[in-house]
Amino acid sequence: MEALVASYGDSDPESDSEPYSESTPQPAVPPQNPVPPPPVSLLIPPNSLFGTVDTLQPIQPNRVRSFPHVDGNYALHVYIPVHVPQPARKEASQFLKKVSLKVPGLHLVDADIPLDALLNDGQKFEHVTLGREFHISLGRTIPIRVHQIDSIITKLRQKLKHQKQYLIDFNKWEVFVNDDKARTFLSLEVTTGGLPEITKQIQAVNEVYRLHNLSEFYKDPRPHISLTWALGDVSDSLQRVVEETMKHLNAAGSLQKRVFSVKFGGIDCKIGNKTYKICKLQNE
C-alpha cells in the first residue's frame, strides 16, 4: 500500500492573486490531542471546483475563514515534495481500488476526477492516482504581501540550508473530515520514520513566519499526504471500509508495517503560481 499528489506551475506570482478560502478538515474520530490533519492547500488547481483550501487545523467546530481578493496578496505554501516509488504503486493502487469499490464518490484530491472512472484500466488507475507529486506541508498556507516575498524566501533558505537526508515512512491510513462536514479525505500519515526531522523543519518555518508576523503552524503537527476526497461527511463508512480492507490484508499476510518510504530530497516554497527551491538534496 502507498500514496501520492499534485504538481505546481512555475509562472510569475502575480498570476495567482485570486481570493481563496480556508476549510478545516479534522480527523473522523478526533485524537486525544487534536492536531492538524493533512495539508490540502495548493494541491488544488486554480480552476478546480474547490478554490484554494488552507492547511488543516486543530479541532475548532464550524470554523471557516475566507480571504477576500486583495491586489498584491499571494498564497504562501512551504512543503516537502513527495513521489511514490514505482515499486510501491501497484500495491497502493490495489488498496485504493478496494476502498473506492465500496465507497462511491471518491475523487483524486487535486482534481474533479472520480476514481471509479479509472477502475476498468488498472495501468491508468495506477499512473493517474500515484504517478504524481504529493506534498507534506511545513507551514500553514496563508496570504502574504508582494513586498514580503524576497524576505521570506531568503530567510527560509537561511534557516533550512543545513539539511541532511533521512527516510520518511508513510505508515498510517487516516480519514479526515472538514469542520463543516462538506468533504471527507483519505490520507496517509507519517507517524514514525521522518517525524522528528519534519517536526524540526516545521519549527524552522515557524521562526520565519514569526519574523514576518505570519500565523505559525499548529502544535503537535501530523504530517500527511491527502489522496482522495468525497463530498459530505462519509467518514464513518470510509473509516469502516479502510479498517476492513486492512484487516483483510492482514489476514492474507500482505499488510505491511509501512505503506511506503521515501528519501527526503528537499523543500520547496510556492508563492502564487511560482515555486522556489529552498533546499535540495541529491537522492542516492
Image: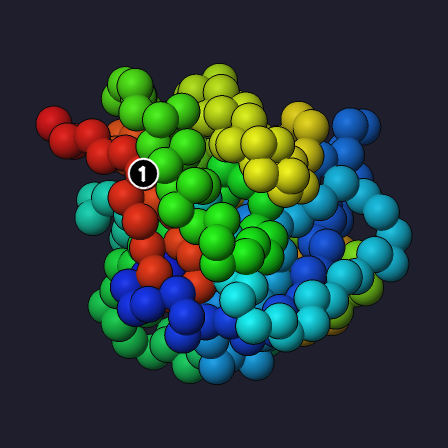
* Front residue (pair 280, 100): 280
Q: Is residue 235 left or right of residue 214?
A: right
Whether residue 237 is visible to the viewer of this picture, yes or no, is no
Q: Quadrant of residue 6?
A: bottom left
Percent coordinates x, y for residue 269 in the rendering: 39, 47
- Could you tell me which residue is drawn at 60 percent across and 53 percent down? 142
Q: Is residue 151 left or right of residue 103?
A: left
Whether residue 209 is visible to the viewer of this picture, yes or no, is yes
Viewport quadrant of the N terminus? top left
Q: How is the image coloured?
A: rainbow
Viewport quadrant of the C terminus? top left
* Front residue (pair 100, 25): 25
- Could you tell me which residue is drawn at 40 percent across and 24 percent down? 159
Which amino acid, by three-letter code, is at mark 1? Ile
- Could you tell me which residue is drawn at 28 percent across and 44 percent down? 277
Q: Which residue is mark 1?
A: 278
Crowd band around label 1 with a 10 angstrom C-alpha radius: few (<14), some (14–19), many (20+): many
- As drawn, which residue projects farthest toward the right? 61
Q: Quadrant of residue 182?
A: bottom right
Q: Is residue 49 above or below residue 252?
A: below
What is the number of callouts on the image?
1
Q: For numbered disc 1, what is the local secondary structure? A: strand
Percent coordinates x, y for residue 51 in the rendering: 58, 74
Percent coordinates x, y for residue 57 in the rendering: 71, 45
Q: Is residue 119 above or below residue 95?
A: below
Q: Is residue 277 left or right of residue 214?
A: left
* Front residue (pair 129, 98): 129
- As drawn, which residue projects farthest toward the left? 284
- Could you tell me which residue is drawn at 41 percent across and 32 percent down? 155
Percent coordinates x, y for residue 179 in the rendering: 79, 57
